[in-house]
Each structure stands twice: as structure tokens, then as C-alpha cells.
Image (cartoon, coloured by chain):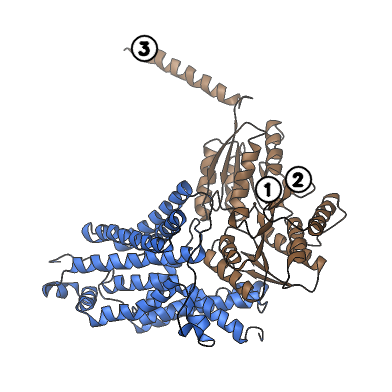
Amino acid sequence: MSDFLTVSVLLATLASGIRLATPFLLAALGETIGQRSGVLNLGVEGVMLLGAYGAYYATLRTDSVLLGIVVGLVVGGVMGIVYGVVTLALKAEQGISGIGIFIFGLGLSDLLFQKQVGTPTPIDGLGDVAIPLLGDLPWVGEVLFHQNVLVYAAFLLVPAMWFVIHRTPFGLDVRAVGETPEAADSLGVSVERTRYITIFVGNAFAGLAGAALALELGIFQQNLTNGHGFIAIALVYFGAWRPAGVMAGSLVFGLVSATVLQWKTLGIVVGTTASIVGMFPAVLTILVLVLVSRRTGQPSALTRPFERGH
Amino acid sequence: MGWRGWLVGMLAFALVMAACAEEEDAGRSADDPIRIAMVGPSASNDLAFTQSMVDSLDRLGQDYNIEVDITDGTFVIEDAAVAIRGYAEDGFDIVLAHGSQFGGSLSEIAPDFPDTVFAWGTSRDTFGLTNVYSYSVQSDEGGFINGTIAAHMTESKTIGVVGPIEVGDIKLYIDGFVAGVRSVDPSITVNVNYIDSFSDVALAAEAAQAHVEAGADVMTGVSQMVVGATGVAREHGVLWFGSQTDQVPLGEEIVVASQIYRWDYQLSQIVEDLLNDAVSGRVITATFSNGGLTMAYNPGLPLADDVQAAADAVEAGLKDGSLSTGVE
């Protein structure tokens, strides 16, 4: 354990935890605003896969990481429109249609990858960007301010999302629509328009989360996200539908995963013990979910379709 | 049409059906291709376990008249079970359940299709059924060769290993790799990290990053998730050793050597058994001595003469039995 408790290893673990947390954070923030407006999207994983593939393929073909990021966002947004039409216009049950979006994303991303790329081909992904002055700070500078742009973007989106939800008229509409859509409607708020916007933004974030994963790794392969989207949904509950809570949950998940990896690397845990310790992140998430669900109520209208007059 | 007409019609129909049945009973003619179906857990081009079988089927097709159908990406075992049963129902001659996780399903399906040959791996269990073959690899041998080379090439005297789950040929390879390193220089630190996932690319990347932070200048890894680890290796100029397929496409500038699984060694024996009506169900293991395992070296990253000589000596020793990896 003494090997682990050195400054360099602790800082490396912290940096690793932040990198691991970033895709979860982006996807979970998107899901948060959607759920605050009453829409559950279980298709986050599928949208992440499509965003990841779109970003990877665009970067592979053009060598432009920036274009890759834009494509990830756009793909996510388009999937948001599709999901909005399915759940809002066609009134499909949210849980089932979300699973449909997941399966669609899983299949289409793999099909496109097989047809357009084939063998996993590395790309030059996102490089680290040092923030002037802050990056030179002892210890924390290396960990916090030598990250890629999507890491910075993800963490800056937390206060931005909080501000939008809690300090803007649109955020008020979102919260009203998510709690009592009938009352919001009676006050002239368009429930459908509000939900279309949150679904669009939420899915764009999911696409960006997929892009963050593919561009950080510099590769794509079948089922690249490997359950990240589902964990992101759990982290929304973990964070009690609050951006800061979601960030805390993402960081805890990322840091615990990074710590377990370090312990394994340093031989602090081996064999069966390592496998048991490897379950810590999931066990911790379940424990917190149980505790949070007792304390905090979800948006009252979550998963409830809105029909005027009903 | 009167009742006589119906009767004649039905008799004619019965005769045609009987003729067809007779033709089926006659079995496959010599000109008919052998129909082989493969169910794989990951993508056909994963540069790892599934691709090793796809490549092997390609090689098998050079020697035999075969028709191949592949269902890949069946990481959900229930999906694989449906595909395995479907292929058997469709009359394929040989059905490959390519993944040790498919054993439970296969043990239930195979007894229902006694005329179909099944093969699965990596495993050494045929469930006592005469129509089930199992295949395995002595992957510690290639691990030992890779480890020997790695020990000669590391300057930091720290080597990292990124493994998925500590089972089967994966564990054999990694244990063999560690033994190979130790055989050259016991003082070298080998950090082994099993991430408990075959497919979590992000976790594999972070495990590799942890190895780099710990000072590793050489790494190895197995399974389809290594694409994450090789990305980190490329970024930091860390040398990489592969297994299962030739992993040079993952980094021409870092991949030194790879152990290649040549499943066609086992497949050709199964096909011969089928053609000679000698299907018996048995375990077939690939080794360097029987040609089921080979090494592939990156021509763009040639080894120093003494290192290549050391690797060749180990391979020769494994082939003639004068050398053992010591891994059990």
C-alpha cells in the first residue's frame, strides 16, 4: 500500500479518475436535463455508440479532431430528434423506445464500422492541452489542467447546466414540465416544445460523450462504450438530478475505478481479491442509489407522456 | 377432378417426396462443400480472438472445399445459443462455438443434433459427447517467447501486462510471458493487471496508462480490449507484444511480435474426421511443435540479432521438447 500512497501515484490516479469520469459526466448531464423535463432515455448507450463512431470516422477520414467532435454532437442531436418524434409525437412508451434506440445504435454503429472501416484503425485522438499558468501549478496543475478539451468542456458544463436549470426562464419551464406538465401547460408553457429541446440537447451530450470516448482512445470497435450509457443513467439517480451531484457521482465512479486499477497494477490486490475489489465501483453505485432514492424524489412526471386534457 | 384423380395426384406427390428423402439420405456428395458455421463473441476483425478463427477459416478454405457462415458479435451468450442451434437446424456440417463462455449452451444443444459436428474452445471438455470437439492452445509457449524478447528489450526493467479475465488461454499466455521474462532476468518487475473485462476499451487504456506511470517501457495484453492499451502504448512509445493475431495494424511503430493462433490446425483434423466418417469427439491442442501456434514479427521493427537468436532458440526448444515454460 505504501507504493500507492506516493504523491506521483496518487496524482496519476486522480488524473486517471478524471479521464474515466468524463464520458459518464457528459452523458449523465444530458440525461439529467432530459429527466428534469420528464423524459427518460434508456437509449443513451446507443446514442453514445453512434456519436463515438461518427466522431471516429470523421477524424479517420479528415484528420480533424474538431470535425470529429462536431459530428459526434450532430449525430447525437439527430438521434434526439428521432427519439423526440418517437416519444412525443408518436407517444411511444419511453422505456421501450429507449431500449429500441440502444439496440439501433449498437447495430448501426457496428454495421457502419464493418462496412466503412473494417479492421480497427488507430487515429490521432485528442491531445492534452495545458492551461497557461494553471497548468504550471505544483501537483494539481498536472492533474487538473493538463487534460483534453472535452474534459474541460464536461466540467465547465456542470455550472452552465445548473445555471440553465435554476436561473433561466427556460430552466423554470423544464422543471415545471418535469413536475406538473398540466400546470405548466395551463400557464402557457409548451410541454412538447420544452421536451423536444431537452431531448435534443440531452442526446447531443450523449453523442459528445461517445465522441469523447473514441477520440480519447483514438480507436473504435464494436460496442466501444461497453455500458457507459447505462452507468450514466444510474449516475443521474446517484446525483439526485442535480448537475453537481451527477459530477460527484461521475468522479466517484471514475476515481474508484482508477484506484482499483492502480492497486492491481502495483500488486496491492491480486487474484480473487483483485476481482472482488474490481466490483467496488458498481457496488458503491448501488449503495448510493439505495441511499439517494430514500432521500430524494425523482421528477414527478418522469416517463409520463403528456396529453392535453388527460 | 374425381376421387381417382386426387388419389393419383397424392401418390405422385408421395413418390416425389420419397425420392427427395432418398437423395437426402445419400448424404453429401464429394463435390458438395463442407458447410461450416462459426459463432464468435466479438467482431470478425477484432485483431484478437474472433479474428484468429476467421483468419484460420480462410486458410482452411485453401485446402478444403468449404462454405463458411459467420455470426459475430454475440457477446450475449443467449444470442450465441440461438445462433448455434439455428446453424445446427439449418444442416451445417460443423458448428463452431468460438468462446469458452458458450460451453454451457453447447452442452445442451449438441445432444439434440447427433449428426452435426460441434467444436468449441478454448476448452478441454467434450461433455462426453462423440459429436463435440474441443480445442485449446498452449498459449504459454508464445507468451514465453514474447517474454524472452521483452526482457531483452526493456530498458526501464519494468514491464506491464493488461489482461481481461484470469481464465483459459489468457492466463496461460500471461503466465508464460512472465515466466519468459523471468528466464532472462528475474530482477525485472512485471506488473500484471487483469481488468475483469474482455471488452472495456477505456479501462484497458487506463490500465496501460497506470503501467506507463509505473515506469513500463514494454507492454503486452490479450483480447479485443487491447486496442485501448495499444493506443496508450503508441502515445508513449512503449513497445507492445501481441497474442492471438498479428497486431501490427494497431501500431507499426510499437508492435514487436505477436503469437498467432492457427486454429486451422484443429479444424483440418475435424474436417478429416468428418470426411472419413471418423467423428469421435476429442480435445485438440495447438502448440508450436504441431504448427498450431506460430510467431509473427514486425518487419518494420526488426530485432537485434542476439535477441532474434534468443527467441529462435526458445521456439526451437519448445518445438523439440528440450524446453518447458514451467507453466501449469
Q: Which chain is brown?
A: B
Q: Quadrant of residue B56?
A: top right
Image x and y of residue A108, in percent: 41, 52
Secondary structure of the residue carrying numbered label 2: loop
Report the mark closest to the observer, 3 or 1: 1
- B135 in relation to B26, above or below: below
Count every numbered label the image shows and give the total.
3
Query: Looking at the figure, which quarter contains the N terminus of chain A?
Result: bottom right
Quick one: label 3 or label 1, which is nearer the N terminus?
3
Q: Amino acid at mark 3?
A: Gly
Left/right placement of residue A86 relative to residue B236 reads left
Crowding at dot 3, Cα within 10 Å, few <14 / some 14-19 / many 20+, comes out as: few
> Looking at the rendered structure, which numbered label has been put on residue B291?
2
Residue A230 on image: x %, y %? 42, 67
Q: Colour of chain A?
A: blue
| Quarter of the rendering occupied by the C terminus of chain A | bottom left
Q: Percent position (x, y) of residue A274?
A: 63, 74
The subunit letter for the residue under badge 3 reads: B
Estimate the spatial distance between the alpha carbons at disc 3 and disc 2, rounded to whole Å: 66 Å
Chain hosting mark 1: B
Q: Which mark is residue B134?
A: 1
* Closest to the observer, B200 or A95: B200
